[in-house]
Amino acid sequence: MNPVDIKYHKEHTWVKVKGKKATIGITNYAQESLGDIVYIDLPEIDNTVDANTELTEIESTKTTSAVISPVSGTVTEANEDLSENPEIINEHPYTKGWIAVLEMENQSELNDLMDVGEYEKYLEEEVKLK
């Protein structure tokens, strides 16, 4: 997956949309900040989630962190490979490390997200503030 093809949320999640299907994961910045990921609580199929709310939680050797959904929708798939091997997120955050697929409710929510250039600029500003 090319990072140019995806949209980014300020809470360091990404979404790649095909039709009404929205594949969601965490960004490379997020996985680096978390460190070694040891567990992910996969979202349940058929759960609905609103944009800007918690989709699930990830545990790393450093902390437990909420994964914020960039869009609203119903969970249609969860990446079962992460149950046994959550470290896939560290190794391949934009490909094999995807977390869930949602059936999107409102595609206009994508307008509130950043493209890769905007996200990189956002990261620069955020890192400066720390």
Image (cartoon, helix red, strand yellow):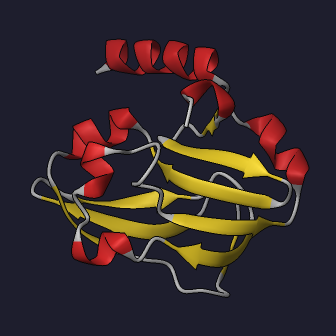
Q: Residue at x 46, y 42 (%)?
A: 94
Q: Answer above or below: position of 111 versus 74.
A: above
Q: Answer above or below: position of 128 versus 115.
A: above
Count of number-bearing discs: 0
Residue most extreme to the left: 61
Quadrant of the image for the C terminus?
top left
Q: Position of residue 83 (x, y in %)?
A: 30, 77
Q: Is residue 46 left or right of residue 94?
A: right
Q: Residue at x 56, y 23 (%)?
A: 119
Toward which corner of the image does residue 96 lie, by quadrant?
A: bottom left
Quadrant of the image for the N terminus?
top right
Q: Residue at x 83, y 36 (%)?
A: 111
Toward which corner of the image does residue 40 lie, by quadrant?
A: bottom left
Q: Residue at x 53, y 86 (%)?
A: 44
Q: Nearer the viewer, residue 26 or 125?
A: 26
Q: Is residue 19 left or right of residue 83?
A: right
Q: Position of residue 2 (x, y in %)?
A: 56, 30
Q: Position of residue 67 (x, y in %)?
A: 45, 59
